[in-house]
Amino acid sequence: MITESTLDDGVFRPSGYNSVWLFVTARAGSGSTIQSQLTDNSTLAWTGQPTGRTDQLIITHESRGLELLVFYRENHLQYPDAAFRYLGRFEYQSHSGKRPANFILARSGSMPSIAEVQADQDAHSAFNPASVRDGREWVLASIVRRRGQSAFRKSLLEAYSGACAITGCKVEPLLEAAHIIPYLGPSTNYTQNGLLLRADIHTLFDLQLLAIDPISLVVELSPDLAGSEYATLNGKAIFLPALEANRPSVDALRAHRIRCAF
């Protein structure tokens, strides 16, 4: 618990910590409307500060390699001495409006299930199963999207000499350009924010079941993969580009590692 009787909402970057501290009061006073709301203990709808000065800190915390730590209370009287309860690490998901902006934050490591994503894709897909041509084009388009933008993929193929950074696989059709920090536009298409990965390894990386320690640069696996064919990768050092300028960003790897729940 953290006590601060005069604080309703606040965003702080404490000196000496690689983190942003977010203090949230759902209902600031008696009879006031709900400004923020925690749903299922994993999703936080938060109304930002009126000045908007700290919006970018929340939006870009992950790309800066910073944890977003959330402290929460329903109202001033929920805990003794107007304290806040520490909820844990959260991640920026989206926002709308400004001054104040309305943010959606999700607990770190929480992800929709594959079944939920598949159901959404099925519901919104424009694929016409009656058309064989549409089917082929849909498959090819999926492969292209998964491989990554051509220029980004080409730069990683060159940087890693055409080999998966983890397995060493050199079968080019299987190699994909993986973003370490999720794709947020052209500014994230830098070689330092990428890894050349075999398709299955890319999937594990994106599902946060596989990470790379930002200091030792060795593979770390989720306990969910213990006993699987991937277990031998745990503790394995990754292959690095010859040019130091092309090597993965330590801050980006740290941000990805923070997202992983294990």
Image (cartoon, rainbow, N blue to C red):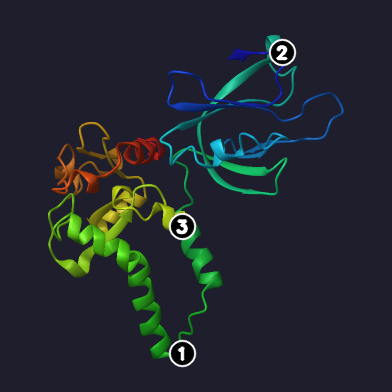
Q: In this view, does 171 lie to the left or right of 133?
A: left
Q: Residue 120 carries which label?
A: none
Q: Residue under label 2, please give it.
A: 5
Circle nearer the viewer, 2 or 3: 3
Q: Kindly identify the amino acid type of the residue bearing the numbered disc 1.
A: Ala
How far is the residue under mark 1 from the one under mark 2? 64 Å
Q: Kindly identify the amino acid type of the residue bearing the numbered disc 3.
A: Gly
Q: In this view, does 121 lie to the left or right of 138?
A: right
The image quarter in which residue 170 lies: bottom left
Q: Kindly identify the amino acid type of the residue bearing the numbered disc 2.
A: Ser
Name the N-terminal-most of marks 1 and 2: 2
Q: In this view, does 44 lie to the left or right of 226?
A: right
Question: Is disc 3 surrounded by few (<14), some (14 to 19) or many (20+) residues within 10 Å?
Answer: few
Name the N-terminal-most of marks 2 and 3: 2
Residue drawn at (33%, 71%), measured in percent from left and top?
A: 143
Q: Quadrant of the N terminus?
A: top right
Q: Residue under label 1, please give it.
A: 130
Q: Is residue 59 positioned above or below 15 on the image?
A: below
Circle nearer the viewer, 1 or 2: 2
Residue 45 horizontal/vertical position (percent): 65, 41
Q: Residue 185 carries which label?
A: 3
Q: Is residue 247 positioned above or below 214 on the image?
A: below
